[in-house]
Each structure stands twice: as structure tokens, then as C-alpha cells.
Amino acid sequence: GAVVSQHPSRVICKSGTSVKIECRSLDFQATTMFWYRQFPKQSLMLMATSNEGSKATYEQGVEKDKFLINHASLTLSTLTVTSAHPEDSSFYICSATSGRATEQFFGPGTRLTVL
Amino acid sequence: GENVEQHPSTLSVQEGDSAVIKCTYSDSASNYFPWYKQELGKRPQLIIDIRSNVGEKKDQRIAVTLNKTAKHFSLHITETQPEDSAVYFCAASKGTSGTYKYIFGTGTRLKVLA
């Protein structure tokens, strides 16, 4: 149980285009989902927290107009990187929690490369 | 806000030896401390966690200790094996539900030499 998937696993795009990443909880209802960014050989940096049906809470320094997060259902959250640039190239990982459980279940990550 | 420091950044041990990784947190309200193992290009996997009402927890070769007064917690891996080689992250969180965010440490790259 507690499986989280992400799609796509890898994406290459041109500078200036937008990319959407999906995060799904496959066997549980995710009341809260988190989005992280991880640069090579670095830690997971929390970008935003999203609760189903409400606006995401962004961490300091994360541009909410550039990283659009939607959590429209209890099993799906999306992260859209708008007008992507090479510096946005990174490993994006989502995680999800359900109800009162504290443990976060992580997705497999999406490697974004912006040319 | 919460800050989590992790040491060492890299650690090499001989197979069969023990490995210890230490983390320090700043927010005394933090009450949940998970440890994750991440292999290259893969998702983090929870290996052990501890809550603030417990001082120590053990699961086979892995143990975690928590000192609330000093605000630090440690991961202990005994009888290390080559497959233990990975990056390990500690994290701190407060609150009792899943709505509370994790703050991760900077990671420790563990190499177990055969």
C-alpha cells in the first residue's frame, strides 16, 4: 500500500515552454501533497505544500507564478513549470500523506532538463 | 523557521563496521524525525523514524536515538553491508498529522567498502 506515482519520469523541453508533472496517490487518498526540488548531490528542498481543494502554500523564495500547483482531487496534484529555463533543470519529487498519518510517501521523481 | 544540520557529508566504512550519522534541529516544537535512504536517481525510502516521546528505536541493524534536550538525533547502522551504500537524509517535522512539512538535512553519502 501507500504507492505514489509521478508522470513523466523524464522530460526534456526547450527554454520558454511549460511542463506539467503529475503526482498521483494510487491506493490512498492524499489530503496533503508536497513538492520538492533536488539538484545533483543536494538535499530535497521543499517548494510547496498543497491541500486538496485549497491553494498551495509556497516556501520562501519559490515563485508561485512560475511553479503552478493544483491539487484538485484527493489522488492527484500537478506541478506546472511555466516558461522553463535551463536553471529549472532538476529532479522534482512529490510526496503525499493521508489523514492523520505523519509519514510522507514519495513518488519516483521527474527529471526535468531544459535546453 | 526550522533548520536541520547533518554530519558528516560523506562517510566511508569497511564492510561489517558501524556507521553513525548525526543531525541537529533548531525548532524545539519538532516532534517527528524520519530517516530516509536514497539511491541514485530514485525516490527516498523511509528506513526508520522516531517520535519525541521516545529516546531510542531499533529495527534490526538500524537504530535511531533522540536527545530532545540537546535537539539532536542520530542514525546508527551496525554490521554495514555494501547494499547500505546510498545517501541518507534526516528530517524534522512538527505536529501529529500529515499536513506538517518535513525539513531535510543536507544528506550523508555513505560508502561501504567491501
Image (cartoon, rainbow, N blue to C red):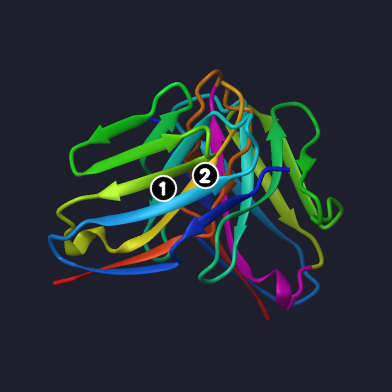
Quickly name the residue at label 1: B36
Q: Where is A113 relative to B55, above or below? A: below
Q: Residue furthest front?
A: B69
Mark 1 and mark 2 residues within 8 Å of each other at the beta carbon: yes
The quadrant where residue A43 appears: bottom right
The quadrant in which residue B28 appears is: top right
- In x, y percent, where is residue A115? 68, 81
Mark 1–mark 2 distance (CA, rounded to whole Å)? 8 Å
Q: Secondary structure at mark 1?
A: strand
Is residue B58 positioned above or below B5 on the image?
above
Q: Which residues are magenta?
A: A84-98
Q: Nearer the viewer, residue A11 or A58?
A: A58
Residue drawn at point x = 61 percent, y = 30 percent: B94
Residue under numbered circle 2: B91
Q: Amino acid at mark 2?
A: Ala
Quadrant where the N terminus of chain A sits is top left
